[in-house]
Image (cartoon, rainbow, N blue to C red):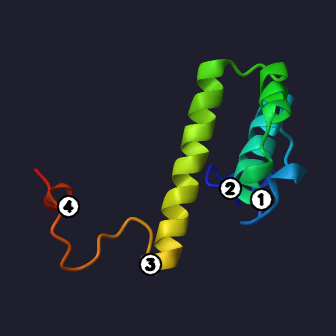
């Protein structure tokens, strides 16, 4: 059951996005983000052109790239250091972690 209580919206966790009913613009974004995540050295100008053809502008493309890259970075850092997501290591002396 979906969070809004509508069974028609419910999707099993981990269901692959290519099976979702998505518009072409969103599908282009997800295709690019997947390639950037899985095969970053193969991202090229044609991938950016596909985003443009789908209606994304230069700022959008920069933001899509920045967000996907950031989440890839943090996910890999957490995996490599065996940190649970969004937890600060015990004993870390970071001003940001101490709150205001």
Q: Nearer the viewer, mark 1 or mark 3?
A: 3
Q: Are marks 1 and 2 in contact (CB under 8 Å)?
A: yes
- Looking at the rendered structure, which numbered label has been put on residue 11? 1
Residue at point 71%, 61% (across, down): 1
Residue 44, x across and y down, in percent: 79, 38
**Residue located beneath label 4 in the image:** 97
Q: Secondary structure at mark 1?
A: loop
Task: Out of 66 and 5, give the one closest to the viewer.
Answer: 66
Q: Is residue 48 left or right of residue 84?
A: right
- The image quadrant of residue 38 is bottom right
Q: Is residue 86 above or below residue 61?
A: below
- Looking at the rendered structure, which numbered label has been put on residue 81? 3
N-term mark: 4 or 1: 1
- The image quadrant of residue 26 is top right
Q: Secondary structure at mark 3?
A: helix
Residue at point 62%, 36% (across, down): 64
Q: Nearer the viewer, mark 3 or mark 4?
A: 3
**Residue located beneath label 2 in the image:** 2
- The image quadrant of residue 50 is top right
Q: Is residue 32 left or right of residue 100?
A: right
Task: Out of 25 and 48, give the one closest to the viewer.
Answer: 48
């Amino acid at each position: 059951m979906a969070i809004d209580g509508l069974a028609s919206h419910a999707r099993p966790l981990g269901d692959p996005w290519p099976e979702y009913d998505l518009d072409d613009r969103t599908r282009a974004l997800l295709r690019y983000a997947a390639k950037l995540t899985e095969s970053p050295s193969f991202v090229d100008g044609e991938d950016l052109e596909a985003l443009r053809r789908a209606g994304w502008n230069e700022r959008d493309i920069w933001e899509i790239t920045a967000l996907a890259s950031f989440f890839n970075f943090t996910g890999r850092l957490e995996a490599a250091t065996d940190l649970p997501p969004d937890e600060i290591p015990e004993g870390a002396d970071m001003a940001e972690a101490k709150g205001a």
